[in-house]
Image: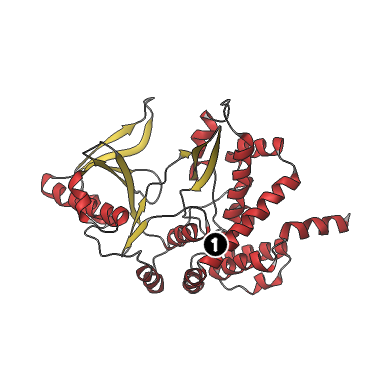
Amino acid sequence: MAIISKKKIPYKISPQLHGYLKKYAREFDLLIEYEDLLRYDNSIPQYDSFGNDTLWETVFYPQSDMDAIHHSLKNIYAIMKADGDMSVIDHLFIDRVDLCVYGNTKPFRVRVVNRINDNFDYFYIKHADASRIYGLELEHLLSPNRIAYLVNKQTLIEEHILGIPGDQFIKTRMGETNLNKTRLAKEFVKFNERCFVRLLGDMHASNFVIDITPDFEEVSYRIRAIDFDQQSFEGRKSIYMPKYFKQNNPIIKLGLEIMTPETQKQYEREERTMIAGRIRVERERVKDLLSVMKKDRISTDKNTNQLKSELASFYDESDFLKCKGMGDIVELSLEMLFRKPDLYKDKEKTVEEKQ
């Protein structure tokens, strides 16, 4: 079972990381920062359809500030979604600004509505954390998913990631007759491998969503991370493997019922091959990111030493013990895709030899 005992401390964005973000058009001089949204003078709690407190509050701004704040928020949306084409904001209005009142980061959620067709979208404004930015960027480069986000000094703006929250899916969808058990189990194995290879931790059911796509007579599933604070911070290898979180047990149990160990290893190998292919396509950008990450401090010495020791044992690779920081560990973890492309086959042979 994977358990995180303490909340992760945030890390500021280094000058080197700012340089990377500017180079790849992630950093902009925006009209508003996180602190500006704290100038609200009233708020009301939000409740779900069952009357339960969502722990989000809708905030209200003084009339003297509201127009300027809403205009700035629409500008952010245009930069993130329309490559800076400000003509799109003529049809938009800010319907609501919500504040999450639990946890450490206290993000704001902005609801944007198109007045022509009443279509709406969300984005989030948060205190920037270097760990989260590395997590977002690695997700963008190494997963099947593209991520839109912006940085302004120490403010982070993220797009809303569509999907059914994992805990809600487990509670309400697992018993449906049209549930494609095989495809869901397969996707969870691949998701587990994606998290482990790039060392994204804390992927319990509340921190990912499940995107459902109709596919002829069946449906397909894509599991997407929505919380990147635990990118390369924890020391235990199990934290980076969603299959060890008890909240995910219903999906894990489903996989154990319908998949053989050989099938699971096949899907793991497939995902490792796909990640390796993405690295080849984005070789220079991945190299630039890892170069910055290796110079950054995003975890404690204790966690770093524990993780490199556990990975050295898992991969049977002593080079992990030479890593100085989490950036070095991530780089070597990705290198294992090329050094040991038949990792799981080799592990099977080792087990057979011992028997």
Q: Residue at x 58, y 27 (%)?
A: 175
Examine the image and state in which quarter residue 188 appears. top right
Name the residue rendered at 60%, 65% in the picture. Answer: 334
Query: Quick one: 16 or 54, which is closer to the camera?
Result: 16
Question: Residue 84 in the image: x percent, y percent?
Answer: 26, 59
Q: Which quadrant does the N terminus fall into?
A: top right
Name the residue type under label 1.
Answer: Arg
Seen at 54% across and 41% down, the residue is: 221
Q: Is residue 308 visible?
A: yes
Left or right placement of residue 70 versus residue 183 in this view: left
Nearest to the observer: residue 103 or residue 287:
287
Mark 1, residue position: 278
Which residue is the extreme one toward the left?
A: 64
Secondary structure type for disc 1:
helix
- In the rendered image, which quarter is residue 44 located in? top left
Q: Quadrant of the C terminus?
A: bottom right
Is 6 placed above or below 246 here? below
Q: Quadrant of residue 35?
A: bottom left
Residue 212 locus on image (x, y percent): 50, 38
* Residue 208 place in picture, x, y as percent: 50, 45
